[in-house]
Amino acid sequence: MAHDHDHHDHDHHHEGSELSDVALRVRALETVLTQKGLVDPAALDMIVDTYETKVGPRNGARVVARAWIDPAFKARLLEDGAKAIGELGYGGRGGEHIAVVENTSAVHNMVVCTLCSCYPWPVLGLPPVWYKSAPYRSRAVIDPRGVLKDFGVTLSDDVEIRVWDSTSEMRYLVLPMRPGGTEDWDEEKLADLVTRDSMIGVSQPLAPGART
Amino acid sequence: MNGAQDLGGMMGFGPVVPEKNEPAFHGRWEARVLANVIATQAIGWWTGDASRFARESLDPRFYLTRGYYEIWLAALEKILDEKKLVGDDEIAAGKALREPVQKADRIFGAHEVEAALRRGWPSARETDTAPKFAVGERVRARNMHPRTHTRLPRYARGRIGTVEAIRGCHVFPDASAHGTGPDPQWVYCVRFSARELWGEAGDPKSSVTIDAFEPYLEPA
């Protein structure tokens, strides 16, 4: 799949003047669907707003931070991910059933969807382009160590890598290891260390001091 | 189907290149494609699995060279055309030229968006049947090549793995994509060693786990 690292074709830079062919086509399709009474533009606006402003990896970071400080919550999270995540108020489309897999010093987990783009929306938001791209989807299952190197992560050869090729029915969230030196940190401060990529399993959380 | 979507294990696409500070959408049109796909699907005339099949049955040359939301757009247009809801001529004209063959008695309204997205569309279903396989059991993924939708990736077919967990009973996408669902089936989390999947090329310490519907598996 082609991807666009620099996102240079933002059509909103020239909204109304010279929209790209695909942007014009989408506008035409939406007009036809609206005229035929098949979509409600106000509902479309709300869907966009949800995924642009309300749902994102900050949700997942809060889940991870809570698991780091609350062993009972962590146990519930590993038992039934979606249910425990629901305790923090997150859930719904694209995360109806979520499994949480825990990284340890011996096991590193990494999530992919080779067939499409399944991803736990309520906790991570929409997947980034690289997650949906052919390079990641093709290599994650056959060369996970190589993919981790693309992200600047080198694991010792004796660390077991578990790749989870997810489908829509069960989506995965990685529970990364809590960084050392954070023993007296509170939940809010810990959540700042939890990156999106660390919850997909292609990087580690930030070290204390990287962002405080 | 053995379409371009089934990418696991392919080579030659180059390194993974993450984008710094990536926005949720690269242009408003991407956001509108997502919203139109969710809203039209919510009418209930076709399933998410049917949408997935529409994407993977696009010409592989198109699928492998277009961006994600272009694929979503092409698949939505294909479904709307097949169901005679919106024709290509109408998109070209930018306006409705005829009535749709089906009228929606209810569409996805603004008042229900928040609750519906929060609830989602869970695939789990009750069942009276007992699971055929047990945790710890060795199973072989069937060497099957349907021309229809399936969630069994090619790289796992014919390979032996171990049932790691039972995920419950879920709507069977192979049926649901083609209007014969829900036909719920047990789903098993099955782990394959990288050596079993890739031979000598497999990392000796790695494994790949898939969630496989019962009809994909046979005793090993």
Image (cartoon, coloured by chain):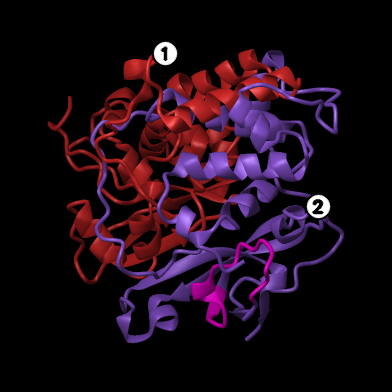
Chain colours: A red, B purple
Q: Tell me what residue is drawn at x 76 percent, y 31 percent.
A: B43
Q: How many marks?
A: 2
Asked if the residue under mark 1 is in contact with the one under mark 2, i.e. CB atoms within 8 Å, the reply is no
Q: CA distance from mark 2 to mark 1?
A: 40 Å
Q: In this picture, is A167 found above or below B201?
A: above
Element carrying mark 1: loop
Q: Nearer the viewer, residue A20 or A149?
A: A20
In the drawing, what numbered circle is on residue B179?
A: 2
Q: Chain of mark 1?
A: A
For the C terminus of chain B, which image quadrant?
A: bottom right
Q: Please tell me whether the stretch drawn in magenta is mainly helix, strand or loop.
A: loop
Find the magenta span and give its range.
B145-162
Which residue does the numbered mark 1 point to in the structure image?
A16
* Number of the front mark, 2 or 1: 1
Q: In this picture, is B5 found above or below B74?
A: below
Residue B99 location in percent, x, y? 82, 26
- In this rendering, position of residue A108 left or right of residue A210: right
Q: In this view of the protein, can residue A87 be seen by the observer?
A: no
- In this rendering, position of residue B139 left or right of residue B87: left
Q: Nearer the viewer, residue A139 or A209?
A: A139
Magenta-drawn stretch contains B150: yes
Q: In this view of the protein, can residue B43 be seen by the observer?
A: yes
